[in-house]
Amino acid sequence: MPSNDVRILAQAAVPTAAVGAVAAVVSGVVAGGKGAIGAGVATLVVILFMGIGLYVLQRTAKSLPHLFQAMGLMLYAAQILLLFVFLAAFKNTTLFHPKAFALTLVVGTLTWIAAQTRAHMKSKILYVEPDSGTKPEKSGHSS
């Protein structure tokens, strides 16, 4: 991954992890150990899903720039659907507190999206790749 992509990934993952840590502490106090485990698992799921999505989106932007916008919309829709499927699959689990898991999953996803949006707005991404130093050929008459 280019350094700009890694920077955007870090600027989205760090706030999400921080919010997940706070959610784990709050869930641990409110719902006990199972609440903390649920919040921790939800934070990992959000960082994993969204991180893979960011990687796929950056690869698409480099290889197929004409599909970037459509791929972004499709990717976010797929991520949200996968998160809802994940919520539905673990709705009645006894491994962890499902409400703490669900709430942390939603808050973590919103945090990731806000942090990624902020990172993109603050980054200075070139719209045109600079030339590698070759001089353009003259198109007119040489006098």
Image (spheres, rainbow, N blue to C red):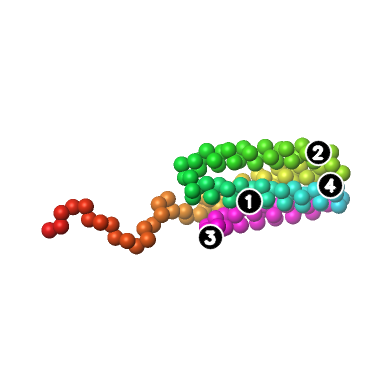
Residue 68 appears at what percent x and percent y?
Answer: 50, 43
Q: Which of marks 1 and 3 is nearer the N terminus?
A: 3
Please give the name of the residue rendered at 68% of the width and 50% of the height, measured from the top-left corner: 48
Amino acid type indicated by mark 4? Phe
Circle 2 residues within 10 Å: few <14, some 14–19, many ≥20: some
Measured in 3D between alpha carbons, the distance from the residue under mark 2 to the one under mark 1, in whole angstroms, is 24 Å
Taking 125 as reference, is 131 left or right?
Answer: left
Q: Which of marks 1 and 4 is nearer the N terminus?
A: 1
Which residue is nearer to you in this view: 53 or 38? 53
Residue 30 visible in the picture = no
Q: What element carries label 1?
A: helix
Mark seen at residue 91: 2
**Quadrant where the N terminus lies?**
bottom right
Q: Which of marks 3 and 2 is nearer the N terminus?
A: 3
Q: Is mark 4 on a helix, strand or loop?
A: loop
Say if the magenta span includes residue 22: yes
Amino acid type indicated by mark 2? Lys
Amino acid type indicated by mark 1? Gly
Please give the name of the residue rendered at 67% of the width and 45% of the height, measured from the top-left corner: 109
Taking 94 as reference, is 88 left or right?
Answer: left
Q: Earlier in the sequence, mark 4 or mark 3?
A: 3
Residue under label 4, please give it: 96
Residue 86: which quarter of the image? top right
Measured in 3D between alpha carbons, the distance from the residue under mark 1 to the one under mark 4, in whole angstroms, is 24 Å
Residue 90 appears at what percent x and percent y?
Answer: 80, 41
Q: What stretch is highlighted in magenta?
A: 1-28
Taking 16 as reference, is 89 left or right?
Answer: right
Mark seen at residue 3: 3
**Quadrant where the C terminus lies?**
bottom left
Amino acid type indicated by mark 3? Ser
Say if the magenta span includes residue 63: no
Compared to 82, does 28 lie above or below?
A: below
